[in-house]
Each structure stands twice: as C-alpha cells, then as structure tokens.
Image (cartoon, rainbow, N blue to C red):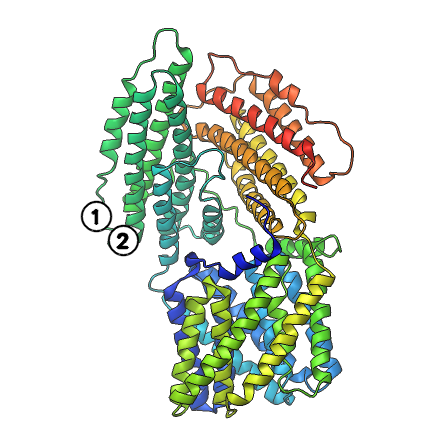
Amino acid sequence: MTAESPLQAVWRALIRFEPEKIVPEIAVRNTLGFTLAVILGTVLSSPSTGVVAGLGALNVAYTDGRDPYLFRARRMLISALLSGVAVALGALSGHSNTTAVIAAGLWAFAAGMLVALGSTAGDLGVITLVTLVVFAAKPLSPLQAIESAGVAMAGGLIQGILATFLWTVRRYEPERRIIGEIYANLAKVAQDPTPAAKAPPMSRRISDAQDALAPLAKDHSTEAERHVFLLTQAERIRLSVLNLGRLRRRLARHAGGEAAAEALARILEQSALAIQWIGERMFATDKTESRNASLPPLAAELETFRNFRSAPGDTFFAALLRDACQQIDALRSQLGAASAAAAGTRTNPYPANSITGTDDSEPWRLRFEGWRARLTANLSLDSTVFRHALRLAICLTLGDALGRSMSLQRTYWIPMTIAIVLKPDFTGTFSRGVLRIGGTLAGLVIATVLFHFIHTGVATDIALMAVFVLLLRWIGPANYGIFVMAVSALVVLLIAVTGIAPAAVIAPRALNTAIGGALALLTYALWPTWERTQTSAALASMLAAYREYFHAVVRAYQGDPISAIEKVRVKGRRARSNAAASVDRMSGEPGVTSRQVATLSAILVHSHSFVHAAMAMESRLYRHRRDPVPAWMPAFAASAEHALADMESVLRHPHVPTRRSRLGEVEAHKPAHDSSALLEIESDRIRTSLRSLGEEIAKRNWL
C-alpha cells in the first residue's frame, strides 16, 4: 500500500463500485413497499398523503436486510417509530425558526453520536435527521403533525410487513442462507488457503453471522440448534483448513516432502467438495435426502497419507506427518458432524464436546447498558465520534439558520445536504460532497426530462418513482453517485405529485444543494479529524485483542474451557478490521508519506503472521485426544504477551520514552525438538512475527 494524494483518494472513492452490496430481492420488495404505500395514501386520502406514506416506507427501507427475521423486524419497527417522531417534531418545530434550528441541531448531534453504535445506527440517525429537516419546512398544526406522523409510520410498517411476512412459513430461511453462504465461501478457502502474510479469511463474514444468529441461543428447537452447531463447526473447519494449508507449505519446503505435500493438497480439494456439499444442503429446500458422498474419498486420501514415512533420524519430518494426520482426522470428524447436521440426520446436533449448547446471549437490559456505556465513553473531544457529532450539529445549525434567513425557495436542501455529505473521515466527506452535487444535478435533469415526455397523470408519476426507488435500492448501495442521482430524481417526482412542476424545483434545489455541500466541505476543512491521529491507537487495540486471544488459547491448553476463546476471537476480528480500515483511510489524507503507510502496512502484515500462528495452535485443541501442555509453553506465552504489551504501549503513547519490547525473553523459551512439530513451527513463527513487529514499531516513522 502506498500513500495517495487527496485527489487520488477522492477519485478512488468516486469510482468505487461494490457489487457485493447489490441485493436484488431487497430492492424489489422495497420498491413494492414504497409503491404500495404511495398508492394507498393517494387513493384513501390525497397525493400529499401518499407522498408522506411513501417517505415513511422509503426511510424504513434503508434498514431492511437479509438477516434473521427477529433482528430485521425489530430494527424496521424502531425505524418506523423514529421516522414518525421526526415527522411530528419537524412539523411542530417549523412554526418558529429558532425552535426549528435548535431541534435540528440537537437531532444532528444525536445522529452523529449514533455512529458509535455502528453503521446501521448511524444511517438511521442521518435518515431521521433528513426527515425532520424536510418536515420543518412545512409547519403543521398539532393534529395534522400527529396525523402525518401516523401516515409515515404506516408507510414504514407496510415496508416492514413485506420484509417479514414469510416469518411464519419460512422461519429459519435467513439463517439457512447465512450458513449456506458461510460454507460456500469456506469451500473456496479450502481450495486456496490464505498465506500468513494476509489477514485470516472470512473474519468479518463469520463475525456478522455470529451476531445474526445470536438470538437462536434462546431458541432450543432442533432446527435452531442445528444452525448454531453448523456455525461453530464452520469456525473449527476454517481453523483446520488454514492449519493444513500451512502444513502443506511446510512439507513442500522440506527435503523429500513434495509427495506428502501433494497428497495433502488433494485432501484439501476433497475437503472443499465436502464443504461445498454442506453449503448446497443448506440452500436446498428438500431435506429428505441424506446422502453423504463427499466424505469417503477424503477417508481414502487420509489412508494414503498415513503411508508416508520419514527418513531414519528425521524426527522433525516425522512430527510434521504426525501433526498433519491428526489435523486431517480432526477435519474429517468436523466435516462428518457438519454433514450430518446439514442433511438433517442428527437428532441432537450437539456432540458431547460442543461449546455452543449454552445460552450466553445478552439480555436486552445488558445490551442497553452496553450501548449507553459506549455512547458515554465517546462524550469527549478525544473521541472521533464526538467531534463528528459536534461538527455535524454546528454545521447543520448554521446551514439551517442561513437558509431560513435567505429569500430563496426550498432552503431546507441546505441542511439536508449537510446531513448527507458530512462524514467522520476526510475521504468520505469530500467524495460524497462531489458526488452529492454532481448526482443532484444529473437527477434533476433526468427527472425533469422524463416528467416532461412521459407524464400523463398520477399513475405514470408513481410508476416513474417506482423505477427510481428500484434503482437507488438495487444499484445505489454499490455506488454513491448512482444513489444520489436516483434520490434526486425521486424527490423531484414526489414534489411533482403534490402539484409543483419539476421545472420550478431545478434551480433552487441545485443552488441550495451546492450551498449545503460547500458548507459541509468548508466545515470539515476548518476542523478536520485526521485519521493519522487515530491509526496508532487502532493498531494498539488490535495487538491488545490479539494478546487476549493468544492468552485464551494457551489457557485452554492448560485446561481452561475452550468456550472462553470465542468472545476474544470475535473481539480480535473486529479490532483487526478497524485497524486495517484506519490505515486505508489514513493513506488518502494529505501530508501522509509513502514511508508512513509502508511501515503501518508492514505492522499489519506481521500481525497477520502472529494471529495465523495463534489460530493454528487453537486448531490443535479440537482433536479427539488432548495432549498435555508442553513444559515450555507457559513461560513462552507469558514472555510473548509481555512483548505484545510493550508494543501496544508504544503505539498508544508514541511520544513517551519506553524500553524496547522484551523479545529476548521470547527467544529464551523454545520447545524441545521431540515435541509437536506444529507447536514448534508456530512458536517459531510467533517469535519471528514479534521480532518483526518490534522492529517496525520501534522505527516510529509512522508518526
């Protein structure tokens, strides 16, 4: 990775297209929900009522997803309620400019703080903020405001019903799809295991799946337990596959190990077929077939591999073969259990040593306390989230006040544009500012032309709106420019339904959008939040999470429950994702040198090597026979944890003089040559990665 100029970073964001965010089924049902809400509102009352219902449906559409129905229904219901509150508060506050500006500013601060709870909460904050600003431009009486809020909530509920109406007849369909996709991607990993220089594959996907399936911990039906069990087995299979990939590469480098490495490659290919079959079974609707044709070839390959022998005296090669055989046997057992669960042939999907049979999901009270604690922790100027919330509130308040003091039409587009454009990071703000202005102008022109040539009545207007809703919910998530163009065209048509010609909207909306975008960019330029001030802390948090994970793995070798590893593993994944994203954002900021980015990228690479080694050590825990903990391991692990703690301290306090990492202690504790080859290899890899990490961090040229 090399440092980019600001223009290069913005250009990369402008042309970014993320096809994985395209979900046609969601786009279609969101379009149906919006169209149905507009039609019902128009038929039962008036075109204006239809517009309000459509806006409510559109707001809730942004919280739709493919996750389990319980999560989806809860999130969409909250979105509908908040949309109704935003409508009522906006319509009531609009009677006074002062009240409207204060209400918008306070809501903007709250929306900015919601970023601390995740992207979904942050998006919901922006959507409801835009709703409040729009309805504040048209004051209503208390009764009318309540009625409009009810209409908006009704439109949102229509959207929610369409997204969840199959809950009763296909209760576990989202969970089956999530598990099926996990195994489909896991099959690709088995075909081409990731090298240690790269981050462990599927980390975010598995973490998201664990979050999505968390409610199943309270559902003790056989079907729910089967899905939780399959997800746990997927995690174990991933560890085994990655470990076998590392052993294959090590065998290939050993003199005389080429044949064994080729045999191990064939075993991984057969494993990929078995994993793929499990994924296909989860997608299948007919569960009566219980064939298991993928496993016998794997068993045959295992018997072939057992026939390899090392040369006399080559104890290390013999240990390599022994570890590989034990890992293959563990993988075969894991695949067998997962295949039986996927085929629906296991009455009780939990074996005796399963770690998923307990109910450890968080009660709602504890989740609320966790959210409150996270928000409270960010109430400081040292927090990026707090600075973003404060910046958004100040800029939006100024923009709203400026618009209300001007004699222009539709000045609510100024604060609305600020809410959409202003983001916590440099690249996101400037790329969205450019795309917002360009996409708005394109949408205005397209909608006006289409309205001029196609408009024959309300029916054709609704049909055109449906087309643009489909576009913004289908292709829009993949590219922000397309999203903005579709939204702009849609708003023009929504206003046209109420009787205002599109031609009368083009000029004021274009002008106000440009003013709002310029204010957002100027505000960020005057008070920026540079990612480079946060990156070292993000890397320190990653090393801290890795240290906890490694500690849990070693404690499991010493007899602690294996289940203790799960939570710290998830914490490590999230910390790694945050650190990598921080380095990526920093690389696009002005003033960042290629040397800084190269050093930070090297820290990431060496940390990947460390965590791969720790994962390989964890994979050895899931064999049928648990070996006693080696005598050298506790002292080695303690010294490695101390070294990581020293590096973490340097990253958190780079300007405070500290001693170098205690790598000498790590070097002093080495395994005996007659111990496990896998543990010997991975302990050596841990020493190497810690040595390299210490060298890169000690340079301090990433400051």
- Residue 63 picture location, percent across and down: 50, 66
Amino acid bearing label 2: Ala
- Residue 550 picture location, percent across and down: 56, 31
Q: Please tell me which residue is depicted at 42% across the width and 90% down the height of the picture.
A: 43
> Which secondary structure, mark 1?
loop
Q: Please tell me which residue is depicted at 44% across the width and 31% down the height of the picture.
A: 619
Distance from label 2 to label 1 (Cα)?
10 Å
In this orientation, does residue 56 appear? no
- Viewer-proximal residue among 88 and 268: 268
- Viewer-proximal residue among 666 and 443: 443
Would you place residue 670 above or below residue 86 in this image?
above
In this orientation, does residue 340 appear? yes
Task: Quickly name the residue at label 1.
Answer: 289
Residue 152: give its label: none
Would you place residue 597 above or below residue 363 in this image?
above
Task: Quickly name the residue at label 2.
Answer: 284
